[in-house]
Image: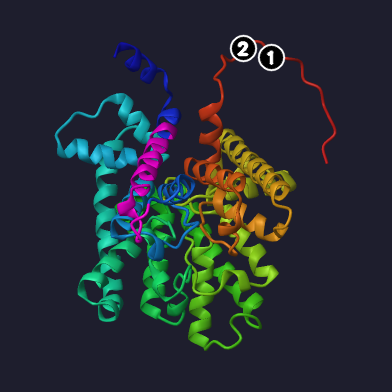
């Protein structure tokens, strides 16, 4: 027992989070392997269960079997729980339960929670977790109520409520896993492409889940006094709006003569906006992803790579990372004094971390791409790029090759989903050996760049 406690103490906060997600995935895998989890009553293979559990916990949405047609009500419930735990973070849920049981939260647990929620300050972290849990419950309930207006008349009372809850949770957590397979395997929300209520509700849930809990707290605290917002919140909100509007326009221009050519004006607007929002880590779709033009696939891949915002249910390199690097490059081009945005200067640590995240993410994506193409040369490079970016960005969109992946390729995608949920920096730090910083510095020498 003492050895176990000693081993646990040696784990860093990032390692604890990584190990915690691993245990959640493993538990979900074992539950999905039970015969009761499958619709036909037969046990599902380990790899399919591991893939599904990882996809749900890492709120990705890539699946090797259709969620509705393969999994029973029990199996779907397991997936729903994994989505909720993965979206909010197991530490947040654990702290809420500890508070309900009136158990004291230790300083070490607060540190792990701080790392899990990606919050700068340790002070008030427990209060933020409590508020987050309450607000998540309110938002998901509101989303479920709105969706029930459409689903209850279509599916009946019980099934309609269940569908509303499942998709509200899946949308808010940016998971992209759906139960629409009753109308055809992997059909997602294609049949609702012209439904304003369903589209707007799902998009709103995705955006609210993707901007981050810290931004939520900041906005609710300062209301419409934008000047009082933290620099982080200003960057997240402004750049999120730019991405949504800009990508919507681009999707319209790229698909107006392709998948949208026979759509009405309202349906075209909804489809363009939905494609823009869902591509940045949600994974739902209202048009056939495989039928997208090459330009739209590239745009979708870029959006999946960017992802949502820090401290949210979304994946990707995060919006703030990209903004910091853009500001840094622009400042160097102009030779201005420091990286300035919204009358504030970004510190060197932010630029360093942003560079690390970008480089590590690119390296992992390229390595996975080469490995999968090497194992399955028959697959289109474009489709593999799309799949890899989708997994790493926990987006869950696919051109349809997920079911065609071999065992080795599926293992790579599983690792990418896991890495994407933890964050590329967290993933790298988890397995890196910490070294003491030497007080001595080596002599510098200039090299040629560019």
Q: Is there CB contact under 8 Å for labels 2 and 1? A: yes
Dot label at residue 441: 1
Picture layout, residue 429 above or below residue 165: above
Q: Is residue 335 magenta?
A: no
Residue 280 as seen in the image, left or right of residue 168: right
Position of residue 418 measured from the top left corner of the image (x, y, whole percent): 49, 42
The quadrant in which residue 125 appears is top left
The front one of 66 and 348 is 66
**Residue 183 appears in the rendering:** yes
Label 2 to label 1: alpha-carbon separation = 7 Å
185 lies above or below 428? below
Residue at left offset 40%, top offset 61%: 70
Question: Dot 2 surroundings within 10 Å: few (below 14), some, or many (20 or more)?
Answer: few
Which element carries disc 1, helix, strand or loop?
A: loop
Residue 8 or residue 225, whichever sits in front: 8
Magenta segment boundaries in residue numbering: 18-42
Instruction: Specify whether 106 is left or right of 428.
Output: left
Disc marking residue 31: none
**Outermost residue, right side:** 448
Element under label 2? Answer: loop
- Residue 306 in percent (x, y) is at 57, 53
Instruction: Kindly identify the residue that appears in the image at 47 percent across and 59 percent down.
Output: 65
Q: Circle 2 sits on which residue?
A: 438
Q: Which of 32 and 167 is in front in this view?
A: 32
Residue 342 can be seen in this image: no
Task: Indicate whether 253 appears above or below 110.
Answer: below
Q: Quadrant of residue 191?
A: bottom left
Prevailing SS of the magenta stretch: helix
Looking at the rendered image, the quarter that the N terminus falls into is top left
Estimate the x, y position of residue 18 in percent, counting from the top left: 44, 34
């Amino acid at each position: 027992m003492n050895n176990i406690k000693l081993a646990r103490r040696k784990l860093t906060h990032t390692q604890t989070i990584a190990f915690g997600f691993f245990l959640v995935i493993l538990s979900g895998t074992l539950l999905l392997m039970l015969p009761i989890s499958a619709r036909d009553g037969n046990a599902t293979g380990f790899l399919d269960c591991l893939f599904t559990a990882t996809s749900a916990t890492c709120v990705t949405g890539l699946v090797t079997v259709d969620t509705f047609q393969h999994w029973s009500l029990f199996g779907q419930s397991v997936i729903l729980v994994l989505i909720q735990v993965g979206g909010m973070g197991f530490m947040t849920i654990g702290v809420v339960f500890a508070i309900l049981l009136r158990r004291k939260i230790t300083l070490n647990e607060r540190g792990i929670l701080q790392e899990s929620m990606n919050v700068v300050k340790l002070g008030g972290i427990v209060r933020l977790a409590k508020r987050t849990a309450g607000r998540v419950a309110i938002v998901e309930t509101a989303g479920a109520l709105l969706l029930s207006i459409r689903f209850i008349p279509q599916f009946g009372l019980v099934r309609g409520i269940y569908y509303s809850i499942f998709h509200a949770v899946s949308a808010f957590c940016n998971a992209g896993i759906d139960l629409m397979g009753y109308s055809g395997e992997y059909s997602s929300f294609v049949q609702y492409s012209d439904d304003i209520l369903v589209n707007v509700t799902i998009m709103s849930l995705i955006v609210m889940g993707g901007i981050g809990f810290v931004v939520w707290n900041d906005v609710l605290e300062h209301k419409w006094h934008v000047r009082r917002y933290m620099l982080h919140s200003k960057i997240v909100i402004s750049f999120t709006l730019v991405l949504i509007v800009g990508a919507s326009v681009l999707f319209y221009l790229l698909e107006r003569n392709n998948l949208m050519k026979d759509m009405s004006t309202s349906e075209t607007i909804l489809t363009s906006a939905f494609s823009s929002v869902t591509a940045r880590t949600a994974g739902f779709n209202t048009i056939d992803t495989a039928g997208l033009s090459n330009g739209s696939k590239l745009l979708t891949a870029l959006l999946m790579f960017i992802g949502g915002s820090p401290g949210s249910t979304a994946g990707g390199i995060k919006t703030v990372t990209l903004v910091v690097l853009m500001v840094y490059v622009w400042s160097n081009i102009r030779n201005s004094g420091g990286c300035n945005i919204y009358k504030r200067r970004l510190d060197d640590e932010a630029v360093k971390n942003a560079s690390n995240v970008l480089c590590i993410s690119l390296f992992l994506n390229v390595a996975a791409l080469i490995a999968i193409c090497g194992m399955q040369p028959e697959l289109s490079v474009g489709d593999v790029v799309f799949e890899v970016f989708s997994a790493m960005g926990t987006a869950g969109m696919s051109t349809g090759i997920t079911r065609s992946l071999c065992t080795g390729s599926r293992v790579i995608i599983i690792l990418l989903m896991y890495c994407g949920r933890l964050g590329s920096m967290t993933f790298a730090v988890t397995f890196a050996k910490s070294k003491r910083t030497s007080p001595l510095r080596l002599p510098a020498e200039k090299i040629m760049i560019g």
